Amino acid sequence: MKGCYYANKTVFCTTFTCRPGCPDAGLCRCLGGGRSGPAIYATGDLKTVVSKDINSVYQAAQKSLEQLQLRATTKVKDALAAKIIARDAQDKKITIKFTSTTEDTTKLSIRVGLFGNETKSRLIYEQIRKNLD
């Protein structure tokens, strides 16, 4: 779905830039602008687009897991995608997925537990953001 949509009274643009003539162009928080787009939590996953290459985001995530004392059990990565699976102290599964969308843009998805945990997902995401700065 391309174009703008509404979520919690904020307009988000699903394209990397607002289309010419977009009626909500002044309100859009476009995913390609700035360092990262809005982190949207839906259906158990926290999803965002980060304006960094996949290698930088992957390294920041690894560092974040160490800082948060989360145990990584599986790490797989190639030039286009990556995935880290970790466990917390309650043995909840944490899945972090990375997808390279352009040379310097990466889609990031974080899921904690079977049904998701927004608070823990956001804490992990904020730590990754700190490590990217």
Image (tube, grey):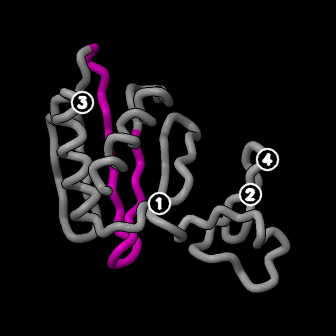
Amino acid type at image mark 4: Lys
Residue at x-position 16% and y-position 29%: 71
Choose top left, top right, bottom left or bottom right for residue 18.
Answer: bottom right
Q: Are marks 2 and 1 in contact (CB under 8 Å)?
A: no
Q: CA distance from mark 3 to mark 2?
A: 32 Å
Who comes first in sequence, dot 2 or dot 1? 2
Quadrant occupied by the C terminus: bottom left
The residue sitting at the bottom extreme is 20
On screen, residue 117 above or below 45: above
Q: Is residue 99 magenta?
A: yes
Residue at x-position 33% and y-position 47%: 130
Q: CA distance from mark 2 to mark 1?
A: 16 Å
**Residue placed under numbered mark 2 in the picture:** 11
Residue at x-position 30% and y-position 69%: 53
The residue sitting at the front extreme is 133
**Residue placed under numbered mark 3 in the picture:** 68
In this rendering, position of residue 19 left or right of residue 114: right
In the rendering, at what x and y percent does residue 61 appear? 25, 47
Who comes first in sequence, dot 1 or dot 4? 4
**Residue placed under numbered mark 1 in the picture:** 36
Q: CA distance from mark 1 to mark 4?
A: 20 Å
Amino acid type at image mark 1: Ser
**Residue placed under numbered mark 4 in the picture:** 9
Amino acid type at image mark 2: Val
Who comes first in sequence, dot 3 or dot 4? 4
What's the magenta bit mostly, secondary-structure-wise? strand
Q: CA distance from mark 4 to mark 2?
A: 7 Å
In the rendering, at what x and y percent does residue 97 appear? 33, 50
Q: Are marks 4 and 2 in contact (CB under 8 Å)?
A: no
Magenta residue span: 90-110
Residue at x-position 28% and y-position 65%: 54
Q: Are marks 1 and 3 in contact (CB under 8 Å)?
A: no
